[in-house]
Amino acid sequence: MATYQLAVNGQQHTVEAEPDMPLLWVLRDVLGLVGTKYGCGIGACGACTVHLDGAAMRSCSLPVSRLNGEAITTIEGLSETGDHPVQLAWLEHDVPQCGYCQAGQMMTAASLLNGSPNPDDAEISASMNGNICRCGTYTRIHAAVKTAAENLS
Amino acid sequence: MSQNLNTRRSFLKVSAATGGGLLLGLSWLSSCERTEAKANGEPELVMPENWVPVTAYLKVGENGVVTIMSPNPEIGQNVKTSMPMLVAEELDVDWKNVVVEQAGLDTENFQRQIAGGSQSIRASWEPLRKAGATARALLLAAAAQQWGVDVAELTTENGVISHGDKTLGYGEVASLAATMTPPEEVTLKDPADFRIIGHGKKNVDAKKIVTGQPLFGLDFQREGMKYAAIVHPPAFGMKLKSVDDRAARAMPGVTDVVTINAAPEGVELQWSDVNAFPNLVAVVGDNTWSVLKAKKALNIEWEQTSAPESSAAQRTALTDQLNNGKAEETRRDGDPEAAFARAKTIVERSYSAPFLPHNTMEPMNFFADVTADKAELVGPIQTPEFLRKTVSAVLDMPEDKISIMMTRMGGGFGRRLYGNFGVEAALISQAAGVPVKLVYTREDDMTQGTYRPEYLVRYRAGLDEDGKLIAFHVRGTGANESPVFANRFPAGTVDNYLAENVLTESNVSTGAWRAPRSNFIAGAEQAFLDEVAEAAGKDPIEFRLELFDRAMTDPVGEENDYDAERYAGVLKHVRDKSGWNTNDDKRGVAAYYCHNSYVAQVLELEMKGDEPRVTEVHCAVDCGIVVNPEGALNQIQGGIIDGVGHALYGAITFTEGKPDQQNFDTYRLIRHLEAPKAIHTHFVENGIAPTGLGEPSLPPVIGALANAIYRATGTRVYDQPFAAPRELPG
């Protein structure tokens, strides 16, 4: 076990964890932030996506010891009251079916819009391609990303 | 309309059994439109200080806010929104003042708490509306008593009772209403007066989902609980022989290692206890990562119990059985062989599809706290009633000592009909003597079995000189199950008809997967009919419509599952809405009936190299009254994308009994880039009582896809998955 200082959603946390414990399980099991989901454990489905300094990252494949004080943002911290343009667009389009993958989808979308506030269809599709939705909400996700972009501009 | 009430006493009044009041890490309440209200600048919902349970289905707060219980498991089919809508409609409340609460397993108060067969709405259409109407009648009776007037003189609107100029809110009479005797009969609304049913309502859990609040089984945490992971045999046909757990026990964070048997001898099991691997080793520890790591340190010896199967051999076995196996004849009309003998043209084709894992995005998991005298289970389960029976049997504990709370599920698709993971969690908790949450890894989940069976079917059709279908023969087989339905289309439209089932045994465990059997046979049948229509020189839609004409005017046989008029209706609807043209070179059409609903689709695609990409789908649906158009559209769209994805890419294969695909690096699910760009859904409006929507849009799209591929490439596809394997994105 080792001790780590993590900045999660604007708050400093001191956590004790095995150095190889992925950030995903630190968030879920140690900090009780369960909005970030486990889907595959190998970075292939995107359910565990969080932001490190605003960039989308697969938390399931990121050992806690590899963090260097980056600002970690999870779905719980995407906005204070759930009114991030991506969250509002997800509500407007009633995107979720089961809803399990959607936190990862939204974190990927928010990261895309951080870097490219006005993405075209091809850019949205390519950027969202790493996040799997078994329910098949892709057309709604696509529309919601466009709405979020419009509301940002 | 006036109806006799369901006689279940508990339907009317609260019974003190399970349900709310649980000290849980999850909040089971979700407000319906709080989010929208906020976006509109309207005030947020103010929660009442006290709730009065008026019936088992609802509680009324002093300020008129109503909690409606959602009895059925929510797997993404949106019943947690649509079922309370039925209650709210007849209760006559403003949806903005409704809060939905997930009910736990409570067989005293609720019926059919199952998510399966697309039956939730169909089965609850009357009972839930009656539940709302009963509560309204109690509130009205209370107001009548308070005012000393005849109840017949009272009216309600949006949660307010009126008599002349006087008004009383539901919250003001709830306490009195709870003491009243329920009426023998209730009057249900004329559908023309519906204010909630038929009006799109957004997912009641959406705000929680988009803000990452705890909702799912995997999110459930309890003070002092441990985490558990299982190891099951690496291949079908194997079982646990022995385990050396010394190294695993020595690892940090590990508190226990136990072996469990979910199918002990002499214990009565349920249909839902499909499980190839009842003997398991489980690691228990302080967090998920500790137990996942410790799994790898276990030294386990497995033993072979039956011959290991590989995919090539499985395919050979299917073919052998189809050709030579003993068939069960499930339907025969006329004299098929004589008709084939005189047919001018015979078309014969075979179709196949592989085993499929469910791959719910939330892997199997369950919480269990088993002590000497009670068991508490919390988690994602489509069949809580059956899980309780099995847990009762394996723990040798009476059912009334076992509580089950259903969490929102990260997908079901049939996998969570089979609650082995819940039984396992209970046994691990019992053996380790601690509350545990069992968590499957993706690999555990994908290699556990309970797969959609692999299937093989052969069709023969005989046409006369005029291109008329005079003989039809379908013979199918599959792993542990044949895909053929005896009485579905085109049965009933052909004078000479033969349907046969042949079983092929496999030690790979199989189970229901979204639209069981239909998820294969629809695509095969609809692709075959496309080819038969072509051989007959007819447009594929006109060819089918001619058959439906026959079924409407002079049906063959007595038992035909479908209503030919509704079936033909969706085909005509999609033909008109899509602007179908016989000569379209990138479009395919299909129609299917299953789960009591009718769906027809026209699918258009383009080829990207050798891979089809679906660009547009028109979908006509007849599911009767659409309770929640918003959720209904989502189900239709999802079923189409899911069907296209699995038909193009889905397959699990085996080498010596071991699944070759264990995670999403090798198992291909459809992704954003490959999803259809536009889906246009057209509902048939006919006022018929509603039927299921979670499954019916998936089966036919596989046929529409196969037919579009043929139009676009000139090549027919017969074996799923249709797309060639390729490297997957990370």
Image (tube, coloured by chain):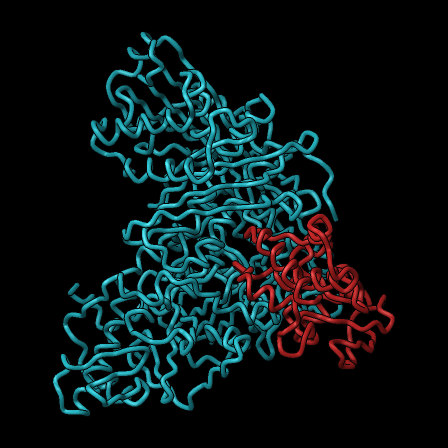
Quadrant for the N terminus of chain B in the image: bottom left
Chain B's colour is cyan
* B553 with respect to B51 (left or right): left
Closer to the camera, B544 or B384?
Answer: B544
Please provide percent x and percent y for residue A28. 67, 70
Q: Is residue B682 above or below residue B404?
A: above
Q: Is residue A75 left or right of residue B396?
A: right
Q: Is residue B155 above or below residue A24?
A: below
Q: Give the residue at x 63% y 78%.
A: A81
Residue B556 seen: yes
Residue B177, image quadrant: bottom left
Chain whose colour in the figure is red = A
Q: Is residue B472 left or right of residue B352?
A: left
Residue B344's x, y, as percent? 36, 8
Residue B712 location (% of width, % of height): 59, 27
Q: Between residues B599 and B155, which one lies in front from this camera angle?
A: B155
x 45%, y 44%: residue: B697
Residue in the image at 44% along x and 40% along y:
B577
Instruction: Please indicate, yes or no, whether residue B299 appears anywhere in the rendered image.
Output: no
Front residue (pair A132, B704): B704
How many numbered marks, from 0 up?
0
